[in-house]
Image (cartoon, coloured by chain):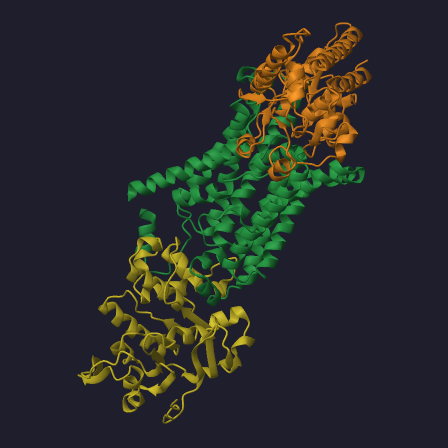
Chain colours: A green, B yellow, C orange
Amino acid sequence: MSTLRHAVADLGAERFEYAASRRFATWLACCIGVTVLLTALSLLVGTTSLEDSLKWLLSPDAQSSVVLWQIRLPRTVGAWFAGALLGLAGAVAQGVFRNPLADPYLLGTASGAALGVTVCLMAADASIGGLALMGQIGVTGAACIGACAATLLTVTLSRGVLQTASLLLSGIVTAFLLSAVTSLLLLTKPEIWREMQTFLLGSTSFISWSSATLLGIVLCICIVPAVLLSRGLDALTLGEDTAQSLGLSLPWLRLGLLGMVALATSTSVGQVGIVGFVGLVAPHLVRETISVNHRQLLIAAPLGGGALLQAADLVSRWIIRPAELPVGAVTACVGGAYLVFLLWRRSRDG
Amino acid sequence: MAEARPQLAPLPSVLSCRDLSVAYGSRTVFEDVSLEICVGQWTAVVGPNGSGKSTLLRTLAGLTAPKTGTIHLQGRRLSAWPRRERARNLAWLAQTAAPTELTAAEVVALGRFAHSGWLAHRKAQDDASMHRAMRATGSLAWAQRRLSTLSGGERQRVHLARVLAVEAPVLLLDEPTTHLDPPHQEDVARLLREQAHRCGVSVVSAIHDLSLALTADRLIVLGRRGVVGHGTIRDALAGDWLSAAFCTRVDIVEHGGVHLWKPALAAPDLER
Amino acid sequence: MFERSCVIVADGAPSLRLGGGAAALALALSVALFLGAFAAQATGFTVRDDLDRPVAFAQYPQRIVTLLPSLTETICALGACGRLVATDRYSDWPPQVRALPKAGGIDDAEIELIVSLKPDLVLLSRSQRITGRLHELGVSSFALNTDSYPEISHTVTVIGEILGLPDRAKHLNQSIGDAVQAISARSIARLHGNAPAVYFEVEGPPYAAGPSSFIGELLTLLGAHNIVTADLGPFPLLNPEYVVRHDPDVIFVSPAEVARVADRPGWDRIRAVREQRVCSFIPAVRDTIVRPGPRVAEGMQAIADCLAREYP
């Protein structure tokens, strides 16, 4: 604080630094530390006991190296990337909609992905041609396509990105509409319900190195424009009219940011299914712990989200090993607990 | 609708509108308004509640699309200005500020957005403008504090600093003195006068405090049915615009060179 | 109706004595028959269903609605297909039931349709929630649970009792038991004591069939060794590395997953995947495996055939 006071007291041509405050640096360090720790732990956690896993690390054989490096490590890395994508998308959504409880699925991406997967599974079941198609694009591709289609539908319904309120409303309408269609389809073929459940509850079980790489690439693609546009989000916090008067092009800003949210969310949903709460809790937690501007938030939130989903993945494979919990169930518990804590703290503070 | 009384030498207008009509849905706010904002003058917009002061400023800033009419900024149609260039030449202050978690310095730095752009690569010139603006509004002391930790008046001064940091030739301020205590209101008035006379900035501000408004150079008086009159203070007093606009509920008296308002003694006509 | 009850009651007909007391005897007989008829109506029979409710039957039901495919198949296997007036939408065996009206599915039975058909009995599973509603509307319902292999014979026996075909039921149980025994013995003999490690994946990744599930029981009967242990429950959601570590000899997956099993991280190392010992069943065959009912032997044979093919 003393350095800041000096900066303020000096009435010369001082530079106004965006204070990369000590707290922000601490948060970054914490997240990176937790990530490293969790990655190390994830090599030890699975269907074997900790001792056996340690033995594997020290004296690996063919099978154990498959389990460690082909299954456990890509899983935790992929989970981190997916969590980071969700954290980023959530932070951006909260900024664009100026609502601290927004989450990345606001545009109906979750329902769209679910519908895509349902259609794909039904096609696979129905005909050989359908099976071939499913083999090509797979469940992940179908989820991605569905999520993007849902976003397009939302933007079309709200007739462009001009009004935030109408975007929110159309997002809700799209979500309900597509959920209804999905339910109707499932009624005709309830055998795919079990597989849908895994998707709907989220699953990190099958993340391979190729999935993890894809998630990583998309994260890099999304985070660069997000950080570049962060100043626009800052301006948005002053109000839409003020932002416009400052020279901001609101439609383009919204289009760019929401497109990024759609890309991030649909990729994540395609790989790990619908994992809730990470996109909501990560940016919210950052804001509650350290007050930041958007450029810092769009770096801190992905780091937090990644660590969160990594931790959830670890818990999901540890608690009832060798069986697993769906990772979405774990994040829901964590998210729910966090919200309850917030409520309690709010009522305590009066 | 009174025409502007010609001055000795007509001052060039930097912002003008012709036959401007604005409506929200089916409700017309004002119709066929034609105004000229003069260079280097502080123009105050006064009128009763609901007469459209904020709407007028918003429309002039290009934030609300008018139903009919045109607006010209420095001779060019407002709609023809590219967005960033317009933002550099026309700064607008909102009546109510949305709550934000940014620090005061970050808020004021946003005022330089039109100059420095997205990448926020701030040059020394930006810093100098920010510094000047914050010093002028007395908000340097809390540069690193978050806006949510400041009082209403302190926040207002930070927002004013933001608008000043734009260093635009035209300022449109909607109630710049909200939340400010009387000494600071006087400070703002002095600041606006200084900007207008010394720096050549054209300031248009909607001010609800009549006495403060009467210290400006020119007046735009809005009534229930549109512009009652626009011109110098003397024209306003001579034409009794204020009485007309406020339905004979105010009287202007002069005291020690300063114009003050007082309630008229006649029984209030609440219906009007 | 009266005649029917007479048939049940009058097992041993009273000997007739002609002559003097004939009239008195005739009167006594009529009175006895009359009383007997009432008594017969009062007894009928009562059976407890799997919800532990006593369900009373005045006579053997002639108009039956089934809401579970395995129950449909059981009734038809007992030769009482003609008594069905409606089934659920998934019942498709034997082919003649496809022409019957469909009364919905497991969670959305069409109550209006059921009531309009005026059935004597509705057979459903324990988990279906319409029993209360049916009771209010005056329709008799009977809940049966068939989740495991031993429960099949219980269901067959109970249905036989209700339909008044206890002999056929016994016969059916016998033939099912014999067929299953035969298949099991053949399979075990063929294996010569080498139990192949088997992983059976039920729809969706990766719910595995544990030994306590119906499928798991079939696998055990065939002499295969399930890599899933009993303590994990009937259908655990496994960590994929579990399968990799246990390296099964043969894996069973759904047809859609067959091509993609090798893409799962680490699974290309599994013996079964490397040597292409992957089994899958077309939907029609899959139905015989997942519906614990009279066709259990067919399903079991399908599994045994694939096992024999892939693990000679």
Q: In this view, does A200 lie to the left or right of A125?
A: left
Q: In this view, does C145 lie above or below C260?
A: above
Percent x, y for residue B76? 53, 80
Give A294 or A8, whichever is nearer the viewer. Answer: A294
Residue at the image point whose x is 33% and y is 79% from the top: B47
Q: In this view, does A102 lie to the left or right of B243?
A: right
Give A193 or A162, whichever is nearer the viewer. Answer: A193
Find residue C57 and report its image quarter: top right
Residue at the image point whose x is 55% and y is 28% from the top: A325
Give B264 or C126, whichever is nearer the viewer. Answer: C126
On the question of residue B98 being in view, the answer is yes
Quadrant in which the C terminus of chain B is drawn: bottom left
Percent x, y for residue C140? 58, 28
Percent x, y for residue A318? 53, 23
Percent x, y for residue C225? 69, 12
Residue at the image point whose x is 60% and y is 28% from the top: A73
- Count the marks: how many? 0
Q: Is residue B155 above or below residue C39?
A: below
Q: Is residue A147 above or below residue B107?
A: above
On the question of residue A58 being in view, the answer is no
Residue at the image point whose x is 52% and y is 55% from the top: A169
Quadrant in which the N terminus of chain B is drawn: bottom left
Q: In this view, does B23 lie to the left or right of A256?
A: left
Find residue C30 and report its image quarter: top right
